[in-house]
Image: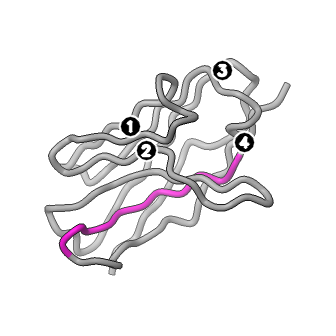
Amino acid sequence: QVRLAESGGGLVQPGGSLRLSCVVSGSIFNMNVMGWYRQAPGKERELVATITSGGNTEYGGSVKGRFAISRDSAENTVSLQMNSLKPEDTAVYYCNIKYPAIPGRQYWGQGTQVTVSS
């Protein structure tokens, strides 16, 4: 069983910063992709950022240049530094881990709310 626990969400003013963290526990294969997705009310879940076990990153178009994903493979953690936050970044942010070698095998956290508002 794999469990993901997110932390770091909250309320922040436009232009501010937040850092999300996710701890992954359980039986984890070494070759994996960790990432963050988000879902705003009335919208589909979308990619925020992913990072492979080799350190390759991918970002959603709306967060490029503002967000930075990182991971500590030894500690099985993934973090998301969010800068220059905008009201449209308001969403529930979900941590994710998936295994490219096992199509369809992925796990999700319960999500953490990020609200950007003055």
- Could you tell me if the residues under marks 1 and 2 are in contact, i.e. CB atoms within 8 Å? yes
Separation (CA) of disc 3 from disc 2: 19 Å
Separation (CA) of disc 1 from disc 3: 17 Å
Kindly give the residue lying farthest to the front in the view shown: 61
Q: Is residue 111 above or below residue 19?
A: below
Residue beneath label 1, please? 69
Which of disc 2 and disc 1 is earlier in sequence? 2
Q: Which of 23 and 13 is in front in this view?
A: 13
Q: Where is residue 40 in the image (x, y as percent from the top left)?
A: 72, 53
Which of disc 2 and disc 3 is earlier in sequence? 3
Residue beneath label 3, please? 16
Q: What stretch is highlighted in magenta?
A: 91-101
Q: What residue type is labelled 3?
A: Gly
Which of disc 3 and disc 1 is earlier in sequence? 3
* Dot 4: element: loop
Q: Residues within 10 Å of mark 1 (few under 14, many from 20)?
A: many
Q: What residue type is labelled 4?
A: Thr
Q: Which mark is residue 49?
A: 2
* Dot 3: element: loop
Give the position of the N terminus as an image quadrant: bottom left
